[in-house]
Image: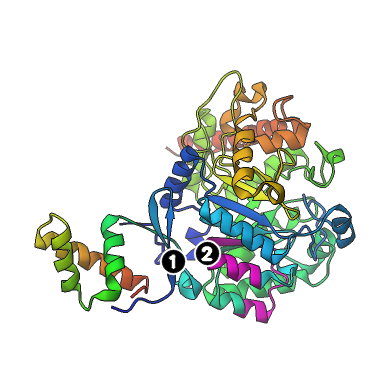
Amino acid sequence: MKLKNNYIIREIMGDTILVPLGDHILQFNGLIILNELGVFILKLLPDVESESEIVEKILLEYEVDRETAEADVSEFMEKLREIEII
Amino acid sequence: METNQNTKAPSTLRSGVEPPLLNYLYSKASRTATPLSGTFELTPRCNFDCKMCYVHLTKGEQTSIGRELDASKWLAIGEEACKNGMLMLLLTGGEPLLRPDFKEIYLGLKKMGLMISINSNGSLLDDDMLSFFKHNPPYKFNISLYGSSEDTYKSLCGVPGGFEKTVHALRTLKEYGVTVKINCSITNYNKSDFEGILDLGNDIGFNVQSAAYMFPAIRRSRDLIGTGNRLSSKEAAEMKLRANLIQLTDERFMKLATAVHEGKRVIDENNECLDLPTAQEETPTEHIRCRAGKCTFWITWDGRMLPCGMMEVPSVSVLELGFKEAWRRTHENTLNIYMPPKCTSCDKRFACDVCAAGCYAETGSFCGEAPEYICSMTEEYIRLVEAEYQKRTATGASAE
């Protein structure tokens, strides 16, 4: 999946923070703190083609049922689309 | 995933209030002594000459004191500050847009992943600069609006034409969707414009944050301790109440008035110097309660680090020590600052905005005498709010 180059990831006080850059701020004037799963998904994005691929990788990595993983991925991807990161 | 995204909220609602996520970060930063938020004072020079300014120097005065840091130095400090945890940065002056290398500094810092706010008088935001900020917007602009007419700008800021340029900038930034907070410092020169300033802010669609208390300009001269080109303490209290009455809904004003009537702490969400949630009352005196020196810092135009820009001391040299050591010393020095015992035990503390910087600016000492101007302003404010409370509750009771 193609990521837009309009954000930067910062590690501050143990939190992973996604900071928007450029005129992107006009749509999203804030910041996001990513949890472990969010960081995992974001790192995966350049190497996957679909959400179902992400779900499969999460199932390999975490002890979680498919339904929960699909719901989490769907919600997170929706948020990334909303703030125009993908 | 936690977010503080405010996409759907209009800028008038979001500009003055910090999102909860930032409060979480500040609280954590204070516990871990992380310099989460900083201010880079890029210059003391300004194209305005406002009567109450705490920092303004002419080019001649500035060069006789020292040299402004060049762009590469600011970027190097920014890099070090980021490594140590800085996320929020305020660029201020003087007027920061006076610097010919402003864009270089701003873009370089922005690329580091900083949430940058800019203080400006707005008058240098010509079409070229406005277009630049349309494509490279800051997290927030804080633009001072000094009056609602050219005449007021001339008498307070000493420059003709400033009003029209500033209003043009504000309207264009609104059109571009850039987040702006309008700051309004109330003085003898613009107090009759106050309603006009609020109306203008409302018309453009930006929140106005007013301040009736002006710090004595001790950074310009220690001779100015306890003095200033400002309203009397009683007038300042009247203006503070006037701002409350105009800007708050009836419900929110009554909430505030009830708190004052009952002697409970009044929380002003627009106050950027809010107490840290972890701040505890201490006796017989207390430490600094705000974020200054705990998780925020200020670097002056000549490279000195202060806990807060309204203070002259304690100051350490970032250029000599490097950022990390300068921050360590600033934090340590801040922990040794105490407030006057009279303030800690004062029965009017619940409605008082006194802070360490104010004590020093009013008395020349952090932990000495109580700052009389602030005491008098608070006493008058409580009296006026109580009178308004009594009037409203009596009216309400008789209506029932």
**Chain where mark 2 sits:** B
Does mark 1 fall on the same chain as mark 2?
A: no
- How many angstroms separate mark 2 from mark 1 (CA)? 8 Å
Q: Which residue is mark 1?
A: A8
**Chain bearing mark 1:** A
Residue B11 percent across, percent down from the top left = 49, 64
Taking depth in this image into account, of A10 and B48 the one nearest to the observer is: A10
Amino acid marked by disc 2 = Met
Q: Which residues are magenta?
A: B104-131
The quarter of the rendered structure image containing the N terminus of chain A is bottom left
Q: Amino acid at mark 1?
A: Ile
Residue B42 rendering spot, x and y as whole percentages: 71, 60
**In the image, is B244 to the left or to the right of B231?**
left
Q: Is residue B284 left or right of residue B213?
A: left
Look at 78% across and 40% down and name the residue there. B232
Quarter-wise, where is residue B147 in the image?
bottom right
| Cβ atoms under marks 2 and 1 closer than 8 Å | yes
Classify residue B362 as left or right of residue A74.
Answer: right
Q: Which residue is mark 2?
A: B112
